[in-house]
Amino acid sequence: NAGVTQTPKFQVLKTGQSMTLQCAQDMNHEYMSWYRQDPGMGLRLIHYSVGAGITDQGEVPNGYNVSRSTTEDFPLRLLSAAPSQTSVYFCASSPSVAGGTDTQYFGPGTRLTVL
Amino acid sequence: GENVEQHPSTLSVQEGDSAVIKCTYSDSASNYFPWYKQELGKRPQLIIDIRSNVGEKKDQRIAVTLNKTAKHFSLHITETQPEDSAVYFCAAVYGGATNKLIFGTGTLLAVQP
């Protein structure tokens, strides 16, 4: 199993550009989530999903959209990038539908810089 | 609101000493408290977790204690080794729900050889 994979590893955007961060898992996990990691701020939950077709907001959802059309994929979209979105983004999956109460398997992360 | 406070933000110990990291949470309905370790440039990985029906859990050199009355939980690492150097995050699941895992701000642990 590849586990949780993320692409790209690095990305530089200009303010106002849009892009999609890709996340995929091959463990047949129902629960998937996106976090951003900033110095001194820890990991903050952006959005999560408990299964295909179901998504919900986390702590910091503004400026981000998600969708879950398949069990395997959970892309994160930035519609109009802002410098405040410069961060490291981690995707995670969990085997339980009650994913918050089970082990989170993190992807390798995407380092995003918005100029 | 949802909040997990973690202290200290940095911790330096001598090899062989013990390290303790403390977290407090605000939602009395929280019932799951994991700890994650993140080495430099790597992804976070679960090292131990505890549920609200248990007061303490051990796994070799690491242990976690939970005080539900005071709403705090702690990570204890004994006989620290240089490979324990990393950032440690506590977390709590919120709102009596099972889907929102909220993390603390992290503790950078440095074990001096």
Image (spheres, coloured by chain):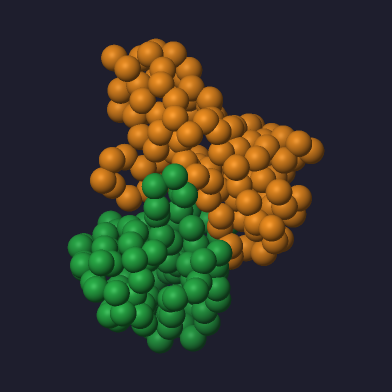
Chain colours: A green, B orange
Specify the quadrant of the image occupied by residue A104. Answer: bottom left
Task: From the top left corner, tell me how far across and down residue B80 is, in percent.
Answer: 40, 20
Please state if A100 lies on the left or on the right of A19 as rendered. Answer: right
Q: What residue is rendered at 27% in x and 63% in y? A: A112
Quadrant of image for the N terminus of chain B: bottom right
From this viewpoint, is residue B90 visible?
yes
Q: Residue at x 44, y 45 (%)?
A: A40
A37 w.r.t. B106: above or below: below
Quadrant of the frame with the C terminus of chain B = top left
Q: Residue at x 21, y 62 (%)?
A: A9
Image spot of residue B18 (x, y percent): 48, 17
Looking at the rendered structure, the number of numbered marks drawn on it comes to 0
- In this view, A85 is above or below B64: below
Q: Which is nearer the eye, B96 or A115?
A: A115
Residue furthest toward the right? B69
Residue B47 figure quarter: top left
Image coordinates for residue A1, horizontal then vertical, percent:
26, 62
Q: Examine the rendered structure and indicate whether residue B53 appears above or below residue A63.
A: above
- Would residue B60 be visible to someone looking at this image? no
Image position, residue A10 (x, y; %): 20, 63
